[in-house]
Amino acid sequence: MSTIPRAIWRRWRSAWRRWSLWTALIALVVSMLVTMVWLAGRYEASQVQSHLERDAADAVSDIRAALTRNLQSLQALNSGDPGLLAWEVEASDLLRNQRELVRLEWRDSAMRLRTHVQSPYRAVLWDRGLRDHNNSEANQACSTARRLSSPAYSGSYYQPHVDGLGSELMELCLPLSTGGRASGYLIATYALQSVLADMVGASLTRSQEASFTEPDGTRLAVLGASRRGSRMFTAQQLLDLPGTTLVLRMDTWHTAPSVFPNVLTALVTAMSIALVTVMWVLVRDNRRRLRAERDLGDALAFRKAMEDSLVTGLRARDLQGRITYVNPAFCEMVGFTAQELMGHSTSAPASALYWPPERVEEYRQRQAIRFAGNTPPREGFESEFMRKDGTRFPVLIIEAPLINAQGLHTGWMSAFLDISEQRRVEELSRASQERLQATARLATVGEMASLLSHELNQPLAAISSYATGSLNLLEPPSATDPQPSAESLQDVRMAMRQIARQAERAGRVIKSVHDFVRRRDQAREAVPAQQLVDAILPLAILQARKLGVRVHTMVEPGLPPALCDRTMVEQVLLNLARNAMQAMDDPTIHTRVLDIRVKRAASNRHNVWLEFSVTDCGSGIPDEVAQKLFTPFFTTRTEGMGLGLSLCRTVVEQHGGYLGFAPHEPRGTVFTFTLPAHQPSKS
C-alpha cells in the first residue's frame, strides 16, 4: 500500500517541475516583451528630448549672433561724431529694419538725454521721470557698462502700451568715447517678444514653443505652436549676457511611442531568446548549487578554525535552556568536554555542571529573568563559575538573542571572559594606590615643614630686629640719668606693637601654609590694594635702607578691592620685593630703585582683575636661569632654599591668577601677577 502513494508523489513532483519550467518560460517571455516595449518608448522619448535640447542650443546661438550684429550696428551709429539730425535719421532707419528694437537714446556722460528715436511699430507709454531715475533699468545698465568698460544689459521689466497692453523690455547700454575719454552712452531698448519672433528661426517655433523665463519659471515672453499631444518635453538654456541672464525655454508635445506594430517581431525574437536562456539558466543553476555547497563547506571550516582560536568562551542554548554549542575555549575554561556539556539543560532539576552548588537558585532566577526578556541584550554581568576540579573563578558574561536566517528567535548566544587575571591586577593596583597615598602624605608633611621654615624666617627676623631696637632704647642714656626719656618709651611702645603684629603675622603664616599644604580653601576677604602695599612697606624699607634702594609705590586710584588671602598675598609681595632688592645688591649698580605698582588688568564683563608689578634695576635674569626659576628648591643664592618663587606662583594660581616675569628696559626685571577683584553681588 505504501508503494502506490510513493509513485503518485514522484509523478506529482515531476509534473510540478515541468509546469514550473513552462511557467517560468512564459513569465520570462512576457517580462521581456514588456521590457522591450518600455525600452522602445524610453528610446523614442530620449530622441525627442535630445532633439529639443539641440533646438534650444541652436536658438540661443541664433539670439547671441543677432545681438552681436545689432551691437555692431549700434556702434556704427555714433562713429565719426554725427550731428543730432543725422543720428536721428540713421537711428530711425535702424529701428525700421530691426523690429526687436523699440527705442534708441543718446545720452551724455552725465546721463542727460540728448535725443532719442522710437520704433514706428509700437506705441509705448514712456515716463521721462522713471527713465531718468537712478534706479531705472537704463541707469543700472549704464552703471554696469561703466564698471565693465563694455556694453551691458539690464534685467527685464514690464512697460505698458497705448492700447492698454504691454510687453517685457530689456535695456542695452553702450558706452561712447571720443579721443579715449567717455563722452556719453547709447541706450537701446529690446522687446523680448520681438527678440523671439525675429531672432529665433521660424523652423524652431513652428512645432515648438519658445519662451523667455525668470529663474523661478515666470514667463516673460512666449512664441510658438499650440499644444498637440499628451506628453510635454522641456529644455532650458541660459542666455548669459553682460549684466543679466535670461532663461530660454523650449517646450514641445509628443504622442505615445508608436511601438505596437513591432510587437510581433519582438515576440518571436523574445521567445527564441527565452528558449536559449532557459537552458542556460538550468546549467548555471546546477553549477551555482555545486559552488554553493563548496563555499558552504569552506565557510564551515573557516568558522570552526576561527572559533577554535578564540580565547573567549562561547556557548549557545535553545529556548528551553539546552546547550547546543560550546567552543574549545569554553570547555578549557570550565574543565568539561564538549560531549559532557552538549544537551545539558540548566533548567532541569540538576544544576549546570559549572555552577557552584550554593548559588544554583540565584543563577536559575537570574536565568529566568533573562529568558523572559526583561533585561536588555548585550549587557554584560559578572558571575562565578566552578571548574571540574572544584576551583572557583570569576567570569564576565555577555548574552545576546540567537536569531536564525528567517528572523526567528531560536535561543541565546553567550560569550564568557575569565577575569581572574584582571581581578588580580586590580588588587595590585589598589595596593599600589594605597602606598602612593601614604607616600604623598609623607611628602606633604615634608613640604609643610619646608614652607614653614622658609616663611617664618621673615616675621621672626622682624621680631628680632624690633626686640634689639627696644633693648637699645631701654638702655639708660647716661649714668647720671638711668631713666629712659618719654620719647624713648614711645619708641619702645611702637616697637612692642610691631613685635606683636609680626608675632600675629607669624601665626597667620603658619595657618595659611598649613591650609595651603592641605589644599583647603583659604579664607578670602576683600582687601584694598593700598593696604596690601602698606603692610609690606615697613619691612621692605628696612632692607632698602641697608642696600641703598629707593622704594617707589603707585596704586591706580579708584581700584576695587582684591579678593584674596591677605597673609599669603602680603608674603608674595614681600618675597618679590626682597628678591628685587637683592638683585640690585651689586657695586656696579649705582641707581637702585624698587618700583611697586598696582593697576587694573585686562578684564571682561564677568571678571575684573588687578595687576601687581614689582620692578628692579638689576642685571636681569639669564636664559638658563629663567627656564628653572619657578622650580622648587632651585636657587642662585647660597643661603636660599629655592621655595620663595615656587610658593609665590602656587599662591597666585590658587587665587586664579598668573605670575610671570619679563625684561625691563633699559635694565632689570619686572615680575607681574594678577588677582581677582571683589565684585559686590547684585540684588
Image (cartoon, rainbow, N blue to C red):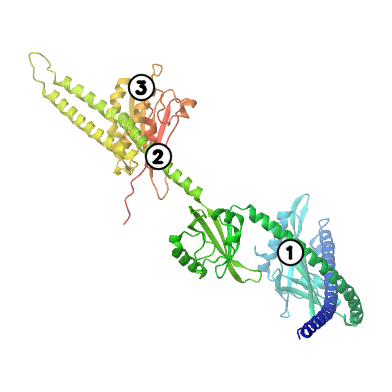
Residue type highlighted by circle 1 = Thr
The residue to which callout 1 is attached is 245
| Secondary structure of residue under mark 3 | loop
Look at discs 3 and 1 and give the one toward the viewer: 3
- In percent of width and height, residue 683 lies at 31, 57
Sooner in the amino-acid sequence: mark 2 or mark 1: 1
The residue to which callout 3 is attached is 639
Residue type highlighted by circle 3 = Glu
Q: Is residue 424 visible?
A: yes
Q: CA distance from mark 3 to mark 1?
A: 86 Å
The residue at the point 33 percent across, 55 percent down is 682
Sooner in the amino-acid sequence: mark 3 or mark 2: 2
Q: Mark on residue 435?
A: 2
The residue at the point 77 percent across, 53 percent down is 177
Q: Mark on residue 519?
A: none
Q: Residues within 10 Å of mark 2 (few under 14, many from 20)?
A: few
Q: CA distance from mark 3 to mark 2?
A: 35 Å
Q: CA distance from mark 2 to mark 1?
A: 80 Å
| Secondary structure of residue under mark 1 | strand
